[in-house]
Amino acid sequence: MEEGRKTRAVATDLVRRLRRAGHDAFFAGGCVRDMLLGREPSDYDIATSARPEAVARLFAETVAVGEAFGVVRVRADGEEFDVATFRVEGPYSDGRRPDTVRFASAREDVLRRDFTINGLLYDPLTKEVLDWVGGEADLQAGLIRAIGDPAARFEEDRLRLLRAVRFATQLGFHLERGTRRALVCLAAEVASVSGERIREEVKRLLLARRRKSGLRLLDAVGLLAVLLPEVTAGKGVPQGESAHPEGDVFEHTLLAISKLARPKWPLVLALLLHDVGKPVTFVRRPQITFYGHEAEGEVLAREVCHRLKMSREERETVAWLVRNHLRLRDAREMRRSRLRQLLAHPLFEDLAELSRADALASTRDLSAYEFVRGAQKELGDTHELPQPLVRGTDLLAMGVAEGPLMGELLRRVQEEQLEGNISSKEEALALVSRLLREGLPRTGEKRSGPDRLSR
């Protein structure tokens, strides 16, 4: 809170300096909206009559981040603020950027913005709100309303189709009737927006507290089917009532999304996609099955991540979580070594949270989740596996060539180390010698008795 007050004070000083230089200047856009809603703005944008070159002369540290649009970034007291010259924009041939821009008055600048709640100006010196579009009334009514002709606003920048739903989700607002009607008619146009821009809007929506209602609205206006057809494919795909009393795959997915206690990207995306393999693996024989849906889901999840232009690390995280989302169900049957490896996996905490939300959205049986949490306590700190007792160089010295045999020997030694059956390099080398002499046991062979956790 203190930091927010400091940021506002610095922004107010920038407005004051612009005014002293003979220019009009106001807080603009989202910061005004948030202030009127009683929220601390994350940043402050300033709209001014000063031309970019005048802004650059007035402040010591500036960067022209949008020169063609009259936007200058000003650095002051260690913080950055976008200072934009009032402007009017020409036609949008590409559905994203205006073909032409000319500097204009404050009122003209407001009328070219997207939604009324973002079309407010605020004078921090006089505490006056300038409202030419009915934004204050829409804030009080909880409405997302396009400024002017909704279809024209959406055609100018098609990302606004998604932004309308995102604002409604984050603020708990409703779409004004005409705005919603235009959105539905133009929903298919969102496909022309770049994957990067779509990703950022989807990310904000999925991290919002009302993400479930946001997804429902996204679906109701036709955007979800365009952006994520893999998710809407779950509509009408039945599941066994005993395991999934909540309904079809789509309903289960939306319910699971609402159960996340710690939503973060890309965990929340992985949960949204965790069952996208079910529609393509659905079989009724006569009971319903989805054999292999984890593997199919991984393939589809990778396609979605590619479409959203996600980083390689994010793609691999989502893919691994989707592929392994049922893995905790087998935890009781795992050997101690395999369980320790799972608990030490860098994505284990995300997997555990995904599994918990998945269970709460179906049978509400958290026994598997509770078992692995108990295993964590019993096994101690498993965030890092112990250093291996032997390495490839040791096996090379014993005459073992690089290849599948070496890999299997190293795996077996690590497994026995994690089981607690060996604890020194000498014991590890003796095990290698015995395995070479007697032949390797069958890969994946399970043990009973003391190899299992006491739980």
Image (cartoon, helix red, strand yellow):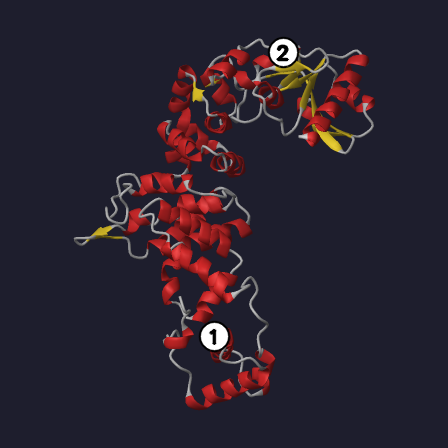
Residue 129 is labelled as 2
Please state if 11 lies on the left or on the right of 427 as rendered: right
State the image coordinates of residue 226 (x, y, percent, origin top left): 39, 34
Disc number lying in front (1 or 2)? 1
Amino acid type assigned to the residue bearing label 2 in the image: Val
Badge 2 marks a residue whose secondary structure is strand
**Relative height, residue 341 to residue 229 (above, below):** below
Please state if 240 lies on the left or on the right of 196 as rendered: left
In the image as oriented, which residue stretches furthest toward the bottom?
Answer: 437
State the image coordinates of residue 232 (x, y, percent, origin top left): 34, 38
Badge 1 marks a residue whose secondary structure is helix
C-alpha span from label 1 to label 2:
68 Å
Residue 419 is labelled as 1
Please state if 232 lies on the left or on the right of 24 as rendered: left
Residue 104 is labelled as none
Q: Quadrant of residue 255?
A: top left
Quadrant where the C terminus is found in the figure: bottom left
State the image coordinates of residue 4 (x, y, percent, origin top left): 68, 29
* Picture residue at 45% right of the left edge, 66% below the top: 339
* Picture residue at 48% right of the left edge, 34% below the top: 209
* Picture residue at 54% right of the left edge, 22% below the top: 92
- What is the number of callouts on the image? 2
Of residue 433 and residue 74, the one placed in the foreground of this image is 433
